[in-house]
Image (cartoon, rainbow, N blue to C red):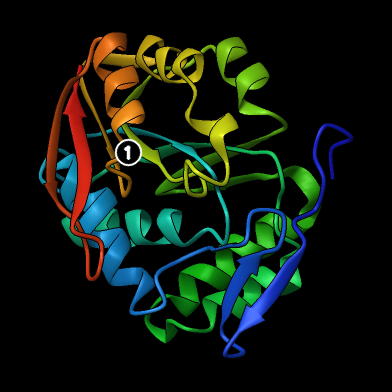
Amino acid sequence: MSDQSKTAELEWRGGAVPVATRFNDPYFSIDNGLAETGHVFLAGNNLPERFANDFRIAELGFGTGLNLLAAWQAWLASGQSGRLIYTSFEAYPMGFPDMRKALRNWPELQELADEMLAQLEAGDFEITTPTLSVKIILGDARKTLPQWQGKADAWFLDGFSPAKNPELWGAELMQAVANHTHAGGTFATYTAAGHVRQSLAKAGFTVTRVAGYGRKRHMTIGTL
């Protein structure tokens, strides 16, 4: 682990759902985390319809890696040539045994999960396959994102609840997200918190509140 990050501390709800004790928040929907990822982050960014060679996704909060696996699965199913390029910013990386345990909830992702974890466990926090290029940037995103040289076509804003993890939803960080988005790029997030929507709008996104997943009435999407 980088000395800029600390390993996530967890409890397990029902033996299957990891909860970050630092934020008292689960990593994914208790109902169906994969379906929520599909609704919020894929459909919210109009994916896979927008996929093209070297499409670039960036993410705040790598967590279990579920969003990456869902995006990779969709990329492969779409028949794209070339690689999906994925960058994730994570301050409190989950231990690999915990990540593996969490991902057992989705047998349909197991082959991809095994490939992801085999490469991550090699110690680089990078993944390179013929169809995927991933870099996980460890540390506080408020410091690491402004230094990033890349730009994304789509953002997955997946930090813990703004009420419990306000550092990952501040106006300066949302501006950094906009600064690292290609013109016409998009974001999606499960939260509909007013101050988050206002910060993203001020940063230059056209922001829309739409129907959320499951018990969450609303979520937010936007285009730069």
Quadrant assignment for the N terminus: top right
> Which residue appears at 72% of the width and 54% of the height?
22
Looking at the image, residue 70 lies above or below residue 3: below
Viewer-side residue, 168 vs 76: 168
> Which residue appears at 32% of the width and 60% of the height?
37
Most extreme residue toward the right is 3
> Which residue appears at 48% of the width and 84% of the height?
105
Q: Quadrant of residue 205?
A: top left
- In the displayed structure image, the side of residue 148 where residue 222 appears, left or right: left
The amino acid type found where label 1 is placed reads Ala
Q: Please rate how many residues cluster around mark 1, counting C-alpha atoms within 10 Å: few if below 14, some from 14 to 19, many from 20.
A: some
Quadrant assignment for the C terminus: top left
Q: Quadrant of residue 183?
A: top left
- In the displayed structure image, the side of residue 80 where residue 175 appears, left or right: right
Instruction: Give the x, y percent position of residue 160.
Output: 52, 49
Q: Is residue 205 in view?
A: yes
What secondary structure is found at the residue carrying circle 1? loop
> Which residue appears at 41% of the width and 56% of the height?
67
Viewer-side residue, 113 vs 175: 175
